[in-house]
């Protein structure tokens, strides 16, 4: 690990939703969390995440960062590693949607979703890989999506990015396994977040109609799976996509 008495985690997109829930699961004394976000400058969500984590005794820091910017990410990861003596955990959670039917999908919306959802995982994982290999320890978890496995009309860009995350996860897991680094993905289904709250009621009803358990998932349910995957109990699990969707995809 980075230091004998401390675990260091980096979480992308940590100011709200699933990212915040992951931070809350990881937050405890002896853990340092660095997270990034890309909220508007006057948004207070990141400040709220910091307050909540500190109440649990966690050392935490945040920065506004475009995770699709290769050099900015590498500089950021290096800075976190230098300050804390290394990085033990990386959770690639940052993601956006720009939904539309293929015939109406703008090139800019395709590029933005692939950049934030998929390229960012490459940027961050490459940035931490060398130091994790050197310390012969690491836990990497990528947040995918059920639509990466089953597709969804109007989300060709989002589904492509999340399918890419699954393939990326398996490939990097093979590369890093010999250095005691695990790489896994969690693929949530319909989870109640600010992102899904913006969906039209008909779209929400359509999603719920596909879920055998008859309800949406909660961010905390995703976060608990992530916490397990970065724990010592999951030391022999790598290259896996853990589906968390109430039976929506089997």
Image (spheres, rainbow, N blue to C red):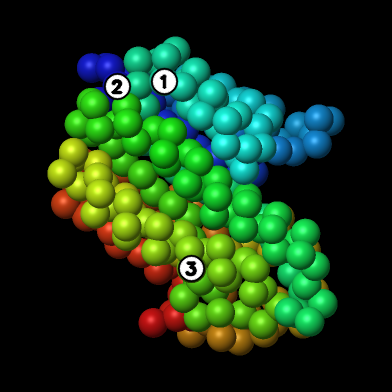
Which quarter of the rendering shows the N terminus?
A: top left
Please, is residue 249 above or below residue 72 in the view?
below
In the displayed structure image, the side of residue 217 where residue 243 appears, left or right: left
Q: Is residue 50 visible?
A: no
Q: Are marks 2 and 1 in contact (CB under 8 Å)?
A: yes
Looking at the rendered image, the disc whose residue lies closer to the viewer, 2 or 1, is 1
Picture residue at 60% right of the left edge, 29% below the top: 72
Picture residue at 28% right of the left edge, 17% below the top: 3
Secondary-structure class at tag 1: helix
Q: Position of residue 90 (x, y in %)?
A: 41, 38
Q: Position of residue 31 (x, y in %)?
A: 38, 25
Q: Residues within 10 Å of mark 2 (few under 14, many from 20)?
A: many
Q: Position of residue 228 (x, y in %)?
A: 31, 49
- Residue under label 3, please give it: 163
Q: Residues within 10 Å of mark 3 (few under 14, many from 20)?
A: many
Q: Are marks 1 and 3 in contact (CB under 8 Å)?
A: no
- Residue under label 2, please give it: 2
In the displayed structure image, the side of residue 75 where residue 128 appears, left or right: left
Of the image marks 2 and 1, the number of the one nearer the N terminus:
2
Q: Is residue 75 visible?
A: yes
- Residue under label 1, please give it: 81
In the displayed structure image, the side of residue 40 where residue 191 appears, left or right: left
Quarter-wise, where is residue 4 in the image?
top left
Count of marks placed on residues: 3
Marks 1/3: CA distance?
Answer: 29 Å
Of the image marks 1 and 3, the number of the one nearer the N terminus:
1
């Amino acid at each position: 690990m980075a230091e004998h008495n401390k675990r260091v985690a980096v979480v992308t997109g940590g100011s709200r939703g699933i990212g915040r829930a992951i931070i809350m699961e990881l937050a405890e004394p002896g853990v340092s969390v660095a997270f990034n976000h890309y909220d508007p400058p006057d948004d207070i969500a990141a400040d709220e995440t910091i307050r909540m984590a500190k109440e649990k005794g966690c050392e935490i820091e945040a920065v506004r960062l475009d995770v699709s910017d290769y050099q900015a990410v590498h500089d950021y990861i290096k800075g976190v590693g230098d300050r804390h003596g290394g990085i033990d955990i990386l959770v690639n959670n940052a993601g956006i949607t720009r939904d539309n039917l293929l015939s109406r999908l703008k090139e800019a919306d395709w590029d933005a979703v692939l950049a934030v959802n998929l390229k960012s995982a490459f940027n961050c994982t490459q940035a931490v890989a060398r130091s994790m290999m050197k310390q012969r320890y690491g836990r990497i978890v990528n947040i995918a999506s059920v639509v990466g496995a089953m597709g969804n009309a109007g989300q060709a860009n989002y589904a492509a990015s999340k399918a890419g995350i699954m393939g990326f996860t398996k490939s990097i897991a093979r590369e890093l396994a010999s250095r005691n680094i695990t790489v896994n993905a969690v693929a949530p289904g319909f989870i109640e977040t600010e992102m899904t709250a913006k969906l039209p009621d008909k779209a929400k009803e359509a999603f719920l109609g596909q879920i055998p358990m008859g309800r949406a998932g909660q961010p905390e349910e995703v976060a608990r799976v992530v916490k397990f995957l970065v724990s010592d109990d999951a030391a022999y699990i790598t290259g896996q996509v853990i589906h968390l969707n109430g039976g929506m995809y089997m």
